[in-house]
Image (cartoon, helix red, strand yellow):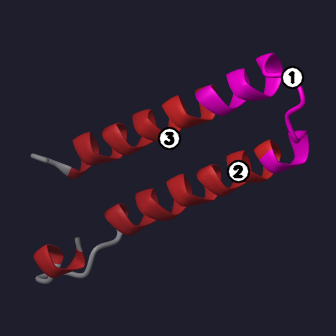
Amino acid sequence: MASRRNLKKVISDIIGDILSECIIYANYVPGVDQKAVGELMYELLEIDEEFLSRISHTEPGNAKQYY
C-alpha cells in the first residue's frame, strides 16, 4: 500500500462487500438464523472501526512493526 488513505479504502471496501453478502444471505436464503447474521454484521462493523482507528494512529517511528 502506498498510503494510509488507500489502505483504509481497501479495508472499507472489503468489509462492505462482506456486509453486502450477509444482507443477501439473510434476505434470500430460507431458514437463516437472523440473529446470528445480525451479530456477524455487528462484529464486522466493529472490526472495520478498529482497523481504521489502528491505521490512523500509528506509533511514530515504529510504523513497520505496527503493521
Earlier in the chain: of badge 2 and badge 1, it is: 1
Residue at position x 35%, y 71% from top?
A: 57
Earlier in the chain: of badge 3 and badge 1, it is: 3
Q: Amino acid at mark 3?
A: Ile
Between label 2 and label 3, give the one nearer the viewer: 2
Residue topped by disc 2: 40
Residue topped by disc 1: 30
Q: Residue furthest front?
A: 31
Alpha carbon separation for disc pair 3 and 1: 24 Å
User: Any mark on residue 15, and which?
Assistant: 3
Apparent side of residue 55 relative to residue 41 in the rendered image (left or right): left
Residue at position x 86%, y 22% from top?
A: 30
Apparent side of residue 65 relative to residue 54 in the rendered image (left or right): left
Residue at position x 81%, y 20% from top?
A: 27
Q: Amino acid at mark 1?
A: Pro
Q: From the image, which quarter does the C terminus lie in?
A: bottom left
Q: Report crowding for label 1: few under 14, some 14 to 19, many 20 or more residues within 10 A (C-alpha).
A: few
Q: How would you classify the magenta stretch by its main secondary structure?
A: helix
Q: Report crowding for label 3: few under 14, some 14 to 19, many 20 or more residues within 10 A (C-alpha).
A: some
* 63 or 25: nearer the viewer: 25
**5 above or below 26?**
below
**23 above or below 41?**
above
Q: Amino acid at mark 2?
A: Leu
Earlier in the chain: of badge 2 and badge 3, it is: 3
- Give x and y (percent) for residue 21: 60, 28
Which region is colored magenta?
21-36
